[in-house]
Amino acid sequence: MSLKKNINIALVGNPNSGKSSLFNVLTGLNQKVGNFPGVTVDKKTGRCMLSENETANIIDLPGTYSLYPKSDDEVVTFDVLFDDDEAVKIDIVIVVVDASNLKRNLLFCSQIMDIKKPVVVALTMMDIARQKGIQIDVNGLSRELGYPVLTVNPRKEKGTAELKKQLLLTARQKYEAPGRDFIDNYELAHEVVDIVKRFYPVSSNYSAIHFASAFHKLTIISKDQKAKLEQELNRVHFNKTKIQAEETLLRYARIRKIMQACVVENDPLKKELFSRQADKILLHPIYGNVILLVVLFLLFQSVFWLAQYPMDGIDMLFGKFTAMLKTRLPEHFLSDLLTNGILAGISGIVMFIPQIMILFGLITLLEDSGYMSRISFLTDRLMRSVGLNGKSVMPMISAVACAVPAIMAARTIENKKEKLITILITPFMSCSARLPVYTILISLVIPKQMIWGVISLQGLVMMALYLAGFLMALLAAYILNFFIQVKERSIFLMELPVYRMPRWKNAGMTMIQKARVFAFDAGKVILLISIILWGLSSYGPNHAQTGAKRWISHTTLDESYAGIMGKAIEPAIRPIGFDWKIGIALITSFAAREVFVGTMATLYSVDGDDEQTLKQKMAAAVREDGTKVYTLRTGLSLLTFYVFAMQCMSTLAIVKRETGHWKYPILQFLFMGATAYLFSFLIYHLFS
């Protein structure tokens, strides 16, 4: 029997169980990230070759501890598994189970099994389990559960071939699901099960209990049916909290019996794990924070040091290539468009790919090692001082990559007011789109010198910019607490994964993905704006009035449409040290902050020396009075503006979507803009 077309396999499991690693191994680079229909929760899908001729779609569902959803991420997992999402119909479920935390993981696993979908259990972290002195009879566990159980090690790519074979067998229905439930769900709530089955053909007794618990949110029954079902459930005094508590006790009772039959565990006091010993230092209230600052310092030093040479090389290569084309191509507007518009825009994209790759590669290594979770733990006390808690840290940390998915990540915060504050302050964190701006400006105005022979001054300034954004986010949260009163507080619970050696392959894969996203997603915007800007910079009303019909007749940059627009806003930005060219860049970079570099590349290409690199052109730029544009005070003022200003259409759109109102993104835009202008003004005049 061959596979049906477009077989869908859901990948589920507890957080930190190895689910994402297994997804990466199964799908490789054949991944794409979107949103689940109707929500902004990330939807990671990928193609997996089960055999030479047969493929499957792998859907990586958000990690969860239970099938009773509390956050929006968990609601997505619930909807997909219970067939309430029309866009995703699951054929097989891979349940990833952490062998080193078997008891807790089996709770969620047993719930999945009772839905009565085809299940394959992937047992991970066997090496960690052995370190803890835990021995598991895998065949015995498979017999007890009634489903195939296989050991996999995604980090070393072991066991994945066997897993694919089992998925093929399961897809071809060459197995028999156990007739019994993991627990007696009918006995648990027989009246509820009978009522639900009269309204909808559920797949199992356990599905009926969940149907009764969440029917208000489901789309597969009508409003009239919901009203009648609610009336029937009230008649039998249905209490979902009571049933959930009873169910959990029954499941753990069965799990204990399975553990006794299949697991041998040594006395945990005989051996203390390396992670516990390391955490005594790394999570120390004093030493831990010092080490955190050192780690961040090394991160930004490395970004500058490692990316410097490839960036300079790419910039120089584009400069020479553009100059060569200008000498060989005929004098024509298409030649000018190619050299001063398209190539200038592409250089503004490609030049910063090394830095993007290095930053995300290092962040992935920190995440893979288990240290990133410790950062949330260490900053919990600080977050509570401004009215939030450690749950807000993870969206803020992920905002270093991009504010859009970071704001989506705030959905895991159950307290609505804390979630709103987190959404409003997260854009203060310096995202990767700011990185090209920081890099070009720091290299222009900060001396390339070493402190004590080992510390880069430019790297220190880069770290200071990131810290400034974080501190302003905390200050904004503190201020917002006076306007948005938070009476209840969420409890911060986080499982700290064990420390592991990071995987270079995983980091490399992430670097390639992030470079691809930057080059093609941000790159399209940068290139489009560069071409539009070329036209605005090359032609103006004076040119049109002359009646000239030859396209090769260019006006000067000052008299172009771009020059006119820039000079119109120059009086407003002159007090903070900006000229009209910077003003144009501020406008264009609202589409995406990284467009600033492409804008500068286009402006200085239209009216500059072809042999020079962009950095050299900007360094040589002068005002009308002959003074340099990019002095220390102007550079620091511009850096400060980009740290605090809200210059991202996508972020404003996602804030509106998450909050449901335009008033929040409007207030966010005005507050961040005013903050940026005020601090830029202070910095510019302080350094005068």
Image (cartoon, helix red, strand yellow):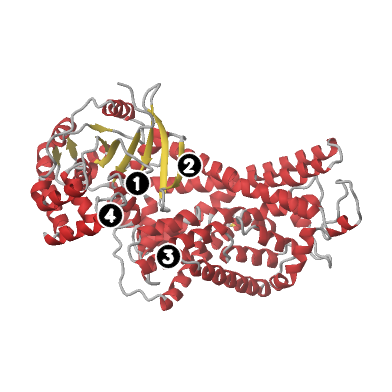
Pointer 2: residues within 10 angstroms few (<14), some, or many (20+)?
many
Residue 16, horizontal then vertical, whole percent: 32, 47
Label 3 – label 4 distance at C-alpha: 21 Å
What secondary structure is marked by label 2? helix
What secondary structure is marked by label 4? loop
Closer to us: 62 or 210: 210
Q: Which residue is mark 2?
A: 510
**Quadrant including the C terminus:** bottom right
Q: Quadrant of residue 648?
A: bottom right
Residue at x-position 32% and y-position 28%: 164
Three-letter code for the amino acid on which mark 3 is drawn: Thr
Q: Looking at this view, name the residue that lies furthest to the bottom.
A: 482
Discs 3/4, front: 4
Q: Residue 197 shows which numbered tag?
A: none
Q: Which is nearer the N-term, disc 1 or disc 2?
A: 1
Q: In the displayed structure, does residue 597 sit left or right of residue 562?
A: left
Q: Which residue is mark 3?
A: 422
Q: Is residue 302 something one can see in this rendering?
A: yes
Residue 486, horizontal then vertical, whole percent: 35, 74
Q: Which is nearer the N-term, disc 1 or disc 3?
A: 1
Discs 1/2, front: 1
What secondary structure is marked by label 1? loop
Q: Which residue is mark 1?
A: 85
Label 1 – label 4 distance at C-alpha: 15 Å
